[in-house]
Structures are given as structure tokens and as C-alpha cells.
Image (cartoon, rainbow, N blue to C red):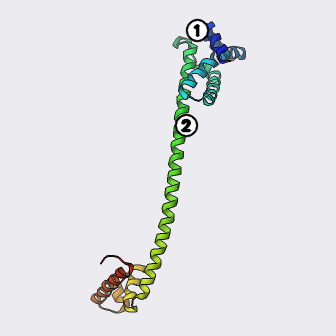
Amino acid sequence: MAKRQASEARHIGASETDRLLVSVAAGSQEAFSRLYDVAAGPVYGVARRVLQDPARAEEVAQEVMLEVWQSAPRYRPESGHAMTWMMTIAHHRAVDSVRTGQRAADRERAVSQQESVLAYDDVVEAVESLGEREQVRSCLKELSAELRQPVVLAYYQGLTHTEIAAALSLPLGTVKGRLRRALARLRHCLGAPP
């Protein structure tokens, strides 16, 4: 079919194609049918060269012919031949199709990479965090009450050293010393370097 359309296109002159497109612009379905027979093959050929995929080229060719029907009133014969105008539309549509396909593939690749990385990282982080919390709780239980109290007030309730001293009715220096000893023992219990 494409060969018949291509040979038919060669037998019709540029001025005849121009006249057909002007008639299409006026709403002639018969002129569009004739123009379709003449132009569909070459339009498909342009799309096929750009896309390298027969199925996508066929879709683009159909879109181009629909666009030719809809935008025929914008065609100006003094600006160039109808076939040149249609081939330009075909080339632009094919290039747009390549770009759209590439962007979709890039988005899909980025989303799948992000999902796999995030999912793994989130699980690992949650497990590590849970493990660390349990280890810290265990180490806190090993501290004496007098060392555990300032740590809990400072790191779990957010009190300053001065506020801890007031809450425990202790001198500021004593609170700082107990915190220092408690943190050293926690570091040792958690296996962190001194």
C-alpha cells in the first residue's frame, strides 16, 4: 500500500497537491481522501526514518494526517508546497514522539531507582535505629540511678544543665560531672571509642 501511495505521489504535481490542500482547508472530504492517498506514504516514511519503529511510525503518520485535516486552513501556498508543509509536520511529530518516549523512560528509570534505594534505606535505617535504641536502653539500665537521672533529663526531656541542677537540687558542677561519667560509661557499654 505504501509503495502504491508513494508512486501515486510521484505522479501528482506539487501544484496539484497544493490545490488539494487548499480544498481540504475549505472542508472538502473528497480532496482530503485524495490528499491522504498521495501523502500518507511519504508521511509514514519520514516518521519511520526518525522513529525506527514501524508501529510508532504508523501512529505518528495517522496523527499527522489528522493534524493536516484540522490545520489545513493555516496552510499558505505562497509559503511553500503542501508536501513540504506536511513533511515538516511529520518530522516535528516524529521528533516529539522520540522525545516523549525518552522522557517517559527517564522518568520510569528515575522512579524505580529512587523507590528501590529509598525502600532499602528506610528499612535499614529503621532496623538500625531500633537496634540502637534497644542497646541504649539496655546500657541506661546498667547505670546507677544517680547517673541515669541527669542523662534522662538532658537527652530525653531536653533540659539544660542549669535546669537539671535545679530539678535535682544539685550544684551545677555535680550535674556536669555525673553527666560526663554517665556518658563515658554509655560509650563504653555501646562499644564506642573513648
Instruction: Name the residue at the right extreme.
Output: 30
Position of residue 5 measured from the top left corner of the image (x, y, whole percent): 66, 14
Q: Nearer the viewer, residue 173 or 5?
A: 5
Q: Position of residue 68 (x, y in %)?
A: 62, 21
Give the amino acid at mark 1.
Ala
In the image, residue 102 above or below residue 116: above
Rendered location of residue 75, percent (x, y): 58, 17
Mark toward the viewer: 1 or 2: 2
Q: Residue at the location (72% across, 17% down)?
A: 29
Residue 158 visible in the picture: no
Q: Position of residue 152 (x, y in %)?
A: 41, 83
Q: Circle 1: is it few (<14), some (14-19), or many (20+) Cα within 10 Å?
A: some
Of the pair 70 and 110, the residue shown nearer to us: 110
Q: From what the image shows, is residue 115 above or below residue 29?
A: below
In the rendered structure, find residue 14 and report the number of the disc placed on it.
Answer: 1
Farthest residue toward the left?
Answer: 173
Q: Residue at x 33, y 84 (%)?
A: 179
Element type where label 2 sits in the image:
helix
Please state if 96 lies on the left or on the right of 32 as rendered: left
Identify which residue, 93 or 7, lies in the foreground: 7
Identify the mark at residue 101; answer none if there is no mark.
2
Inspect this view and state whether residue 53 appears.
Answer: yes
Identify which amino acid the numbered label 2 is placed on: Gly
